[in-house]
Amino acid sequence: MSEEPSVKRLNMIEAINDALDVMMGRDPDIVVMGEDVGYFGGVFRATAGLQKKYGRTRVFDTPISECGIIGVAVGMGAYGLRPVPEIQFADYIYPGLDQLVSEAARLRYRSAGEFTAPITVRSPFGGGIFGGQTHSQSPEALFTHVSGIKTVIPSTPHDAKGLLIAAIEDNDPVIFFEPKRIYNGPFNGYYDKPVEPWARHPDGAVPEGYYRIPLGKARVVREGEALTVLAYGTMVHVAQAVLAEKGVDAEIIDLRTLVPLDIETIKASVEKTGKCLIVHEATRTSGFGAELSALVQERCFYHLEAPIERVTGFDTPYPHSLEWAYFPGPVRIGEAVDRLLKA
Amino acid sequence: MTEATPSSFSGSNLPPLELHVPEPRFRPGDAVDYSHLVIPAAGVQPRPDEGCAASETHPLCLDLVRVLGEDHKAIGPWDPKLDPETLRRMLRLMALTRAFDDRMYRGQRQGKTSFYMKCTGEEATSIAPAMALASDDMVFPSYRQQGILIARGYPMVDMINQIYSNKADKLKGRQLPIMYSAREASFFSISGNLATQYPQAVGWAMASAIKGDTRIAAAWLGEGSTAEGDFHSAMTFAAVYNAPVVLNVVNNQWAISSFSGFAGAERTTFAARAIGYGIAGLRVDGNDPLAVYAATRWAANRARANGGPTLIEHFTYRAEGHSTSDDPGQYRSVQERSEWPLGDPIARLAAHLEALGEWTPEAHAAMDLDLAEQVKAAAKAAEANGVLGHGLHHPFRTLFEDVFEELPWHLKEQSEQAIRERRIKWPEWKEDDA
């Protein structure tokens, strides 16, 4: 028996920083780049201290060009490096879409494996910080729709570190969306109450050193019989709080990876509970919830006891002053839960 | 492959390749010495005819157009020869912009809104162009040109309503503070994404040319944003269609924590981008309001006479943080601001007016007091309409309006849902608030 690894209390930013540090120490081919990530350490401080430790040719600032950042990452990957570019906000990723969608995602396929793009694009996403429409978006479904990109979204410091390590080690391009609303604590949607810091949450306990959480493996946050909740990122905590408040014996599944998806865990759970609630913050139409709903319908139809429910952001740009009216919070989730339980 | 190229240079005695990563000269705690900056004397830069070949301006892309000399007198061919009344108006507008910024910054710190961005030290780069352009020329600003709205007489109370995202906000609380939109002031809706307005300004200018209009367009972005593809698309289209547009690059040295070297400033100037695209370019002392005015006037006259686009680099300094979310003390020396060799635009214009015998320190102090009172009154009037997060916001249904011209069924359903959710959370809530 090996000794238990020692554990640190970290928030999600620190856990991400720790993952980058661990991986840069292990693999000299890893480079970190992006706007303000170097000397300053990133606008959210996720890369703090890394330039000082690993030098300016492994951790560096870039011009403000998302197309350039992702394009040069593809080129570095073609050389044999393992770049981990940061896009400062997910809302800024669109100028880089051609490089991601037409290039990174297709390189392995079009070159029959001669060239690959082993890049991990980190980007803070999601709202709840009064960031308005240009600092709040959840564009994950754009990427799950593109064949050849993996999409990963952690919901705890523990998972953020292990998933980021697995993403960096993965030989295919990965979009790693960090729910910035839960960087400092598991915000649960009750915006008028204080947020508990990660230091007091069990998943703020992060093992030191190297460990990985495999991509494509969901986490059962809570086992239950009454209904299945499929969520990821911030919404895992919101759903958990609402169901606890209502005293519902729900099975809550944190998907962790949208592509590849852990369909087995989903199927087993819905077959057991017969009811399925899907929760995401992104807009509803053609959101990832639509894909989840179709899959559950296709694979669990004869076990379903109620229509599948989707709770999502509204189909509008993310507003500023009416942020909490937009956010799929406790009331919206509560209504859907009631409908499912009544069915 | 018949002729094989050398298979490899490895093993040769070439030194290994090295990656160059730019690094600013000064970091926190460093003493600042700007002796490397070439600051030519005022008045010596030639002023080509507004109808000249673009190439005639290209030496000016590596120079610095300056009008106000060390003795605070206006000198040389770029002196726009403005009368004292106009100079005092320019001074007042810059000082008003600064007073506005100071109050709004404090408002954010007091929790009245989520975010604010000041333009301290850069006031000349929006006030002087706004005065040099026609009031109906269409401007496509970035997020630091509040001075244009102030110069165009847009009501401060409307600006503050937007900043506070309150029930009188004309943008219905949808946008991040300072992301104004003011069609009646010919001021395009500000995007939070960078450089997107640049090709749009070129397109507006092309449309004006298509329709045989007399109005031109102008756009602003920061030097950091010139790295975005949109900047280069705009330059290409402006050159290809000889679009009547003035393209401003506000080089304030810093893009959040990244110094201008990360946009290419170690190699050449930003004005020199014009050379590669074959359009006119000017590099201007951005803290010299008369030089900025003169350069804008030159470019606007040229554009209006079918002479085509001009790229203007305004060489200036971001005296404060990027925004209320930024702490520049983390990455740059505080001495940079105090040592900045081009001074402060308000102080320089005031000194010029004093040198003309048209202004006094007493008049300046009285003006500052008066402007602070004006801003205070506007802020109070706006606060009566609410501040962010205190209930006085637009009705919930407005969240769903303007996504499309007409509300599709799914947004109708979602609008009803939002109102239902509100009733569940606040059972005493009244229908007419909807």
Image (tube, helix red, strand yellow):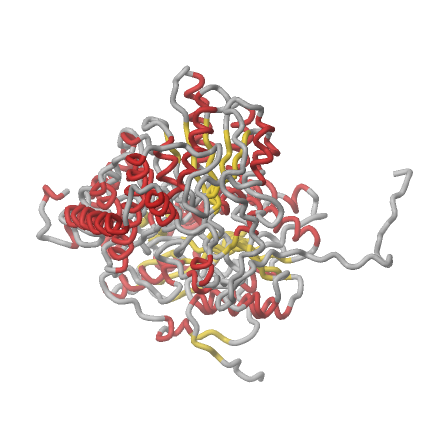
Is residue B256 visible in the rendered image? The answer is: yes
Identify which residue, A4 or B74, lies in the foreground.
B74
Q: Position of residue A159 (x, y in %)?
A: 47, 66
Left or right position of B293 against A62: left
Q: Position of residue B221 (x, y in %)?
A: 45, 41
Identify which residue, A339 or B416, lies in the foreground.
B416
Q: Residue at x 40, y 58 (%)?
A: B326
Identify which residue, A17 or A168, lies in the foreground.
A17
Q: Position of residue B38 (x, y in %)?
A: 57, 49
The mark total stands at: 0
Residue A160, relative to residue B178: is it above or below? below
Left or right position of B294 against A187: right
Q: Residue at x 43, y 51 (%)?
A: B343
Q: Residue at x 50, y 47 (%)?
A: B224
Q: Residue at x 41, y 15 (%)?
A: B212
Q: Give the quadrant of the C terminus of chain B.
A: top left
Q: Position of residue A174 (x, y in %)?
A: 55, 53
* Residue A13 figure quarter: bottom left
- Most extreme residue toward the top is B212
Q: Give the quadrant of the N terminus of chain B.
A: top right
Residue B165, relative to residue B271: is it above or below? below
Is residue A255 visible in the rendered image? The answer is: no
Identify which residue, A66 or B84, lies in the foreground.
B84
Left or right position of B220 against B407: right
Residue A330, relative to residue B310: is it above or below? below
